[in-house]
Image (cartoon, rainbow, N blue to C red):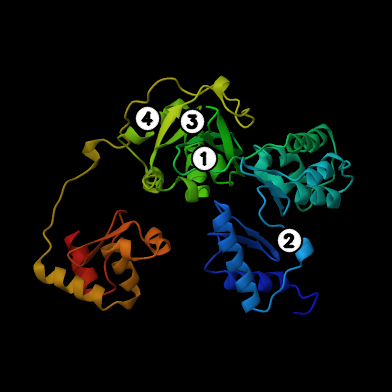
Amino acid sequence: MQFGLSNAPAVFQRFINNIFCDLLDITVIVYLDDILIFSNSREEHVQHVTEVLSCLQKHNLFCNPSRCVFFVTEVTYIGLVVTPEGISMEQEEVKAIQEWPEPRNVKQVQSFLGFANFYHCFVHDFSCLACPLTSLTQKDQPWVWEAAQREAFHQIKTAISQEPVFVHPDESQPYTLETDASGTAMGAVLLQRKDDGCLHPVAFMCASFSPAELNYDTHDKELLAIIRTFEHWRIFLEGTEHPVTVLTNHKNLAYWKSARTFNRCHVRWHLILASYNFVIASWPRKQSQKPDTLSRRMDHSEIEPSPQIMLPETQFEGFGAEITTPLLEQIKEALQDNPSLDTVMAAAADPDSMPHSITAKFKDYTSQDSLLLSYFPTSMIPLDLDIRAECTHLS
């Protein structure tokens, strides 16, 4: 491929991914021309290296021996130092951040944020710390470099210079999840207890709320932080053998799963969290594993919330209608004659036989007696005018 083409990196990455498709994320990690081979023992490593070199030879690709390192327990890979104890930042990159001069214009702020953002996963609440700087990069935003921007700049440099180390996740050990939300953002820490009996960070996460989410109350923001965290770390937290302990400083969340009434938003959230094995526990702020920089509120209720009834029973009228057998047969035939529903029907009838992406997409549907049912209060009626008219008449 010629030099200078804008799509050259993407095309080459796809080419490399296709070459190592059988080994990718099993024994090999590849980023462009940087290949990382990992094994549990020396004997396995000999086999894995042989497989990688054979694959390269098969496709007429060559490695520079002076750029290769084999049979080591510590390696530097794309700015990260990987050891048996965990993952840390490369010293040269940390030194570059420490010596970075104060920006004098928007371009220099963008350059700093672009470089520092590579290590944002090592900085607890990075998005919150960088908020005064990211606001400068918005369109039509006047250049202002005052105490808030200067403090954010030096806080990011200090946080990166502390060089935190992430431990490797162990699927056989339980996870601990610490979450917190403020008025504008959320943060989380994934932890595991190691041999020394202490909780060590596996990963950090931070994100800002959307304009609509900014209107949520404290309870919903704290709950949304938990949902966002589970979705972000689904690869670690879904299907765990041990329950995930979720630590939150919002005490009311400990009773959320036992609440008797839900609005439609909470119903959707409840279905999302139903895929995970976890327990919510209240966590005093003074015992927090990491400094809580997002939320300083002291208005969290200490009282268990009593069940609330949004609408009294007098607002509802009970009614029932029996669906005749001919109508059921018409619905079944209409479903079978609609090819656009074949995937949905197959996923609802036998979820285990479908790919995970398909099952997750149609997890709210189930099949019963060749009929398609939904957990949401939505009508699942085929696009047949006669059938729709009769169902509407029954309701």
Kindly report the distance in space between the C-alpha atoms of the residues bearing marks 3 and 2: 44 Å
Q: Which residue is mark 1?
A: 225
Task: Residue 80: give x, y in percent of width and height.
Answer: 70, 49
**Quick one: label 1 or label 3, which is nearer the N terminus?**
1
Q: Taking 45 as reference, is 117 above or below it? A: above
**Which element type, helix, strand or loop, lies under badge 3?**
strand
Q: Which residue is mark 3?
A: 247
Q: Amino acid at mark 1?
A: Ala
Q: Which residue is mark 4?
A: 255
Around disc 1, counting alpha carbons within 10 Å, would you say few (fewer than 14), some (14 to 19), or many (20 or more)? many
**Quick one: label 4 or label 3, which is nearer the N terminus?**
3
**Quick one: label 1 or label 4, which is nearer the N terminus?**
1
Camera-side residue of 182 and 127? 127
Q: Which residue is mark 2?
A: 68
**Quick one: label 2 or label 1, which is nearer the N terminus?**
2
Task: Residue 392: give x, y in percent of width and height.
Answer: 22, 64
Around disc 4, counting alpha carbons within 10 Å, would you say few (fewer than 14), some (14 to 19), or many (20 or more)? few
Kindly check if marks 4 and 3 are in contact, taking CB atoms under 8 A apart as contact: no
3 vs 2, front mark: 2
Kindly report the distance in space between the C-alpha atoms of the residues bearing marks 1 and 3: 12 Å
Identity of the residue drawn at 15% across and 50% down: 319
Identity of the residue drawn at 37% across and 42% down: 263
